[in-house]
Image: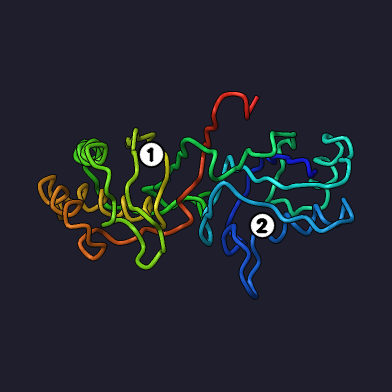
Amino acid sequence: MANRYFIELSYDGSDFHGWQIQPNAKTIQETLNSALSTILRTEIYTVGCGRTDTGVHATQFFAHFDLEMEAPPLEDLCYRCNRLLPESIALRRIFPVATDAHTRFTATSRSYAYLITQQKDPFAVLRKWELREALNLERMNEGADILTQYQDFSCFSKANTQTETNLCDLTFAQWTQDGTDLKFEVTANRFLRNMVRAIVGTLVDLGRGTIDTDALHKIIASKDRSEAGLSVPAHGLYLTHITYPEGIIS
């Protein structure tokens, strides 16, 4: 019987076409599979806790893989993988879990952050969205509070995603400001494709004053993606935290 292992990692998504393997494109999953397969000398296929899009980053991400053979010392395996992987991917640890633990389906919540800079910043290129317009942060937080009153987020979902439901339990949403930087943080049990970027685009419209809070209620109730704001650039988005039931992650 195969043993299952979780990998905790982080990555800069700037040079990748997202997590998931796809034809003729460089992805995080393919790069990680290749490193593990080379070191373990057997074909390894990792399963991720989610599917980040092209250019999206992760400060915390989990993947799992199964191994029929006895694993080498896991600290050594982690070290050797990091030596082989590009600088933009860093493994934090590899640890054994129960065979029914699943990085995607066992997760109970996910958190994202979206970063905006309101000045030209050479260190923010491909890390934050540069947006110099004046924004009303108080109004944007009123909109963030409104989000927690709903469960159906169809209006923020990419079309034709083959999901069974567009219902999400969104438990936290908040904007904060640090000098010229703005951060939006959001937590839910699950997210729809493109959901966070569409939410940010809509809340920015609220901050610009092009819509009001009554309009936001109507947008969500419409369940129509064309009613919501534009999808903001991917490079400002970070997957920041995944939670699992007690006992899986120590």
**How would you rate the neighbour count of disc 1 (Cα within 10 Å): few for under 14, some for 14-19, many for 20 or more?**
many
Q: Which mark sits nearer the N-terminus, 2 or 1?
A: 2
Q: Calculate the distance from the C-alpha at mark 2 to the C-alpha at mark 1.
A: 25 Å
For residue 249, what is the image quadrant? Answer: top right
Disc 1 element:
strand
Q: Residue 163: x, y in percent? A: 40, 58
**How would you rate the neighbour count of disc 2 (Cα within 10 Å): few for under 14, some for 14-19, many for 20 or more?**
many
Q: Residue 126: x, y in percent? A: 52, 56
Residue type at mark 2 is Gln
* Depicted 22 relative to depicted 132: above or below: below
* Depicted 60 relative to depicted 19: above or below: above
Give the image's coloring scheme: rainbow
- Left or right of 88? Residue 176 is left
Q: Residue 239: x, y in percent? A: 51, 44
Q: Quadrant of the C terminus?
A: top right
Which label belongs to residue 186? 1
* Depicted 231 relative to depicted 176: above or below: below
Tell which of 248 and 195 is nearer to you: 248
Residue type at mark 1 is Val
Residue found at x 72% / y 59%: 31
**In front: mark 2 or mark 1?**
2
Which residue occupies the extreme front position in the image?
A: 1
- Left or right of 209? Residue 197 is right
Residue found at x 17% / y 57%: 222
Residue found at x 64% / y 51%: 47
Which label belongs to residue 146? none
Q: Quadrant of the N terminus?
A: top right
The residue where tag 2 is placed is 29
Tell which of 40 and 180 is nearer to you: 40
